[in-house]
Image (cartoon, grey):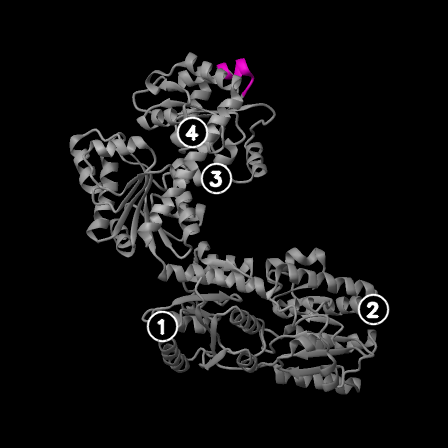
Amino acid sequence: MKKYKILMTTMGLDIGGAETHIVELAKELTKRGYDVSVASNGGVYVEELEAAGIRHFEVPMNVRNVSKMYQSYKLLKKIIKDEKFDIVHSHARIPGFITGIINRSEKFTFVTSAHWVFNTSHGLKYLTNWGQKVIAVSEDIKQYLIDNYNTPEENIYVTINGIDTDKFSPEITGDDVIKEFNINPDFPVVSYVSRMDEDRSLVAEQLIDYAEELDKSIEGIQLLITGDGNSFDRLKEKADAVNKKLNRQCVIMTGGRTDINKIIAAGDIFVGVSRSALEAMAAAKPVIVAGNEGYIGIFSEDKLEKAQENNFCCRGCELSNGELLVRDIKQLLLDITDEEKAELGAYGREIIFKYYSVKKMADDCIEMYDDAYSMNNGKKILMSGYYGFNNSGDEAILTTIYKNIKKMDKSISITVLSKNPEETRAKYGFENVVYRFDLFKVLKAIKKCDILLSGGGSLLQDTTSTRSLMYYLSIIKAAKMMNKKVMLYANGIGPVSKVKNRNMVKNVVNKADLITLREQDSMDELVSMGITNKNIYVTADPVFTMDIIPYYRSKELLIKAGIPTTKGIVGVSVRNWKGCDTIPERFAQICDRIHDEYNKTIVFIVMHNPADANISRQVMEKMHSQAYILDGQYTPNELIGMIGHMEVILSMRLHTLIFATKQRIPIIGFVYDPKISNYMKLLNAPDGGNVEDIDVEKTVAAYGNILENYKDVVENLDDVAKQLEEKAELNEKYLGTLLK
């Protein structure tokens, strides 16, 4: 992908977890070839950034003052305009607010990071702009964004506070710090690092307040407290008073420092929270996790889950107090052996390598950058189809096409027209979903796209209704009127019976830029209408390229649904069809025969809920043998996975038959539409007759024949399936030509 020109905006660059996160991220991205700059009010880390070749722009975004914010707005807008950054990445509320305003007039990709939770009272919520995408540094902050700002889950990425494991390492020595502050190396040292602001310095103050008590228990103990902020002077006075009373240097207040790795190295143990705690773990120090928001205590394997839930920030944990600190400091320095302390330190460093490396943090950010940038700059495709109707076949088409396009080019932005946008977003994690019957939004989506993709299924037919046909033709027509490219993607065409409808299809389809069809019969149907478009190709249904969940996972789903797996399973997929009242009775007879004569488990597969569930239960009510039903809210990938555990599939539904073929499961089809008979002929597979007159004896005989010749049937199925899979892959190849 593109090596972006990135500007990171934050309030300041003094000591703090978020500030260190920004510095490490900027340095790692720079190493990887990205052009990174930082804008802030300045601070101790500016020198480190500039030493790494990272430019710093001074912008006073550190105070919520109208005058300063307006000044920052003018300065930042000029910087962005002059430098032409691809991406602006904001790391705090004020910079995010200012950047969001600038983004209204200047073209760039705007993303943010959420390092902590903000006060949302008194209208402060509206000072917060999370950009097009946002990185949360923990799962609980992700949930906070969803709950408090209604941020769509698909727009949130979770990363970690990446730690430089070379900079923070047991190999680093604290000798310089020990010498500078006259620390006595013969006595234990407790290191602590945090901003010394009123909302961050609770634990620092508790350490000072309980220094005398610690001194009584631990001979010569020294508390090395690092950080600067608005409470530093007050705490320094308290520390000086303690030292005077003890008549020695017990509490050492260093102020703000950038050599945090050496501060940590100078200590025997570490007390702190968030990033500083992780840095100490990387240095293999035993760590007491404690901060303003809570107390976890001595970090060990049993504390990992709790610590990770809140990114070592202690949110939701019991509050810190002096008694807890004294207890745990005494335990580490008095009650456990050096070997046990070393084991704690080694475990902490192991956790950093496993979950919290700066490389992992940079990878997560780059993924967000790629996705956000593609939204603004990649090709834009609008997908129209029978989506959001809870039909697993059409949902399989949607998800497979979506996956294949993203695999082809991740920068492509895809918008989906859906009957149920919220469900489509939630179920599949799609970013852009539009209600298909909102005329204004649909036309707006067409206007924004580069290509309209009329995707899969039997969209152009009038068997179900002329209204449905008119909808899809109107979408295509509107796209062509706006000079958009149009592709009919793996469509099944027909039947189109009415003369007027056939003429409309002819007129509209002839204007399409590219047409792929899922079978030859659809080509024949178009030719019979007089369509002369030269860009027509016969491929195969995209579902032949869909992903399947792991075998063990699909078996777990079957067991959870109460399906016995100890004997052969026969899957049955039925649907209502007008004028066919005998469907429940005939299928009940077939299922009972197979159950009784072959000792098989009968399982009904619901492809379209609730319609298929209702007709399936009608069949089950007429059966004398026991049967089961898969009517849960399964994804297409889960359904096809479960079908893979079945022996034979009996189906009225085309995509149940395709799911089975993909899994090399023998099939028997029941014809309600030419597409079923055409598919059965293609596979040289048996059918149970037309749904208006289902042949029970023929079906049972066909089933018996499959069992007798199972190996040969599967081998034939495998040959045809491989051909169809290869043909299905051509859909993306042809789409690629249109994208060029």
Q: Which of marks 3 and 2 is nearer the N terminus?
A: 2
Which of the two discs, 3 and 1, sits closer to the camera? 3
Secondary element type, mark 2 = helix
Report which residue position mark 1 lands on. Answer: 102
Looking at the image, is 60 positioned above or below residue 678?
A: below
Q: Earlier in the sequence, mark 4 or mark 3?
A: 3
Which of the two discs, 1 and 2, sits closer to the camera? 1
Q: Which of 102 and 316 is in front in this view?
A: 102
Residue 722 pos. (x, y %): 45, 34
Looking at the image, is 587 positioned above or below residue 552?
A: above
Q: What stretch is highlighted in magenta?
A: 593-600
Overall secondary structure of the magenta section: helix
Q: Which amino acid does label 3 sit on?
A: Asn
Residue 637 tag number? 3
Real-space CA distance between mark 4 and mark 1, rounded to the nearest whole angstrom? 53 Å
Residue lying at 33% horizontally and 28% vertically, measured from the top left: 675
